[in-house]
Amino acid sequence: MIKLVVLLLIVLFGTPAFAFEIEPQVKLTSINFEERGISEGNKFMTGVAFSVSGGDNWQWSVTPELWQMAEPADEDPEIPDQGVIINAQLGRKFTLLGIDVVPVAGVYAGRWERQGNDKYKGSWTYANFADVPFGVNLKSGIFYAKLNLLLPVFVQTDYVTSWAIKGPHEMLEVGIEYQGLTANVFRRRIGFDQLDSDIYLTGVGFGFKF
């Protein structure tokens, strides 16, 4: 059985089967939150991530993230102030005109928490969610782009549990990688359509691969 698993990994991810890269990341972002079509304001948020990736033709990545509001909520308790996310993707690389093209799909799941929104009855204080990301990753020289969409399929709060395909919502990243150093700008919309709520993250990220 063990030999079969090792053989499968070799076929999928290349030889050696367990070669991988590790990339710690720091993210600085503005979080904008909308509920029932009304913008509730912006706050400064920081994030840390730890990406593990590997493969040659078949490429995989697993990236857990921790997010924390970097300023007091004050008069904005309705804005989510902390979150945890795990983003796992699998894709197949093709090369077109010297550009690495990797169609990808996977799982994007996590939890966001906030104090609540007194303006609405039954206001949620936590939201567990699961989305299906799909799209394409591109790389040419030191430049790369990740053009993904998120399909929300599940959300659970202190008041509701819902399974329904919604969206899609954008998850975009453009950056450079040079001698292991990475820098990027990104924009994400994490939509809780079942709650009529949207989180927008817009910011920059820095990392180092080894």
Image: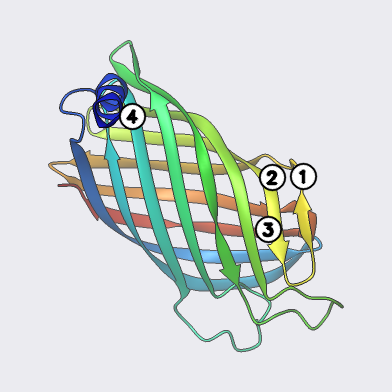
Please tell me whether mark 1 or mark 3 is closer to you in this view: 1
The image position of residue 152, as x and y in percent, is 67, 46
Kindly check if marks 2 and 3 are in contact, taking CB atoms under 8 A apart as contact. no
User: Disc 1 to disc 3, how far (Cα)?
Assistant: 16 Å
Q: Residue at x 67, y 39 (%)?
A: 168
Q: Is residue 112 left or right of residue 57?
A: right
Instruction: Give how far apart the Cα atoms at labels 4 and 2 are.
Output: 24 Å
Ranked by sequence position, the earlier of labels 4 and 2 is: 4
| Residue 185 visible here | yes
Name the residue beneath numbered marker 4: 59
Nearest to the observer: residue 175 or residue 118: 118
Query: Dot 2: few (<14), some (14–19), or many (≥20) neighbours within 10 Å?
Result: some
> Which residue appears at 12% of the width and 42% of the height?
179
Residue 153 tag number: 2
Quadrant for residue 93, please give it.
top left
Quickly name the residue at label 3.
198
Disc 2 to disc 1, how far (Cα)? 5 Å
Between 163 and 98, the one lying in front of the other is: 163
Q: Earlier in the sequence, mark 4 or mark 1?
A: 4
Which kind of residue does numbered mark 1 sit on?
A: Ala
Tell me residue 32's x, y (percent): 60, 65
The residue indicated by pointer 1 is 164
Q: Residue at x 69, y 45 (%)?
A: 153
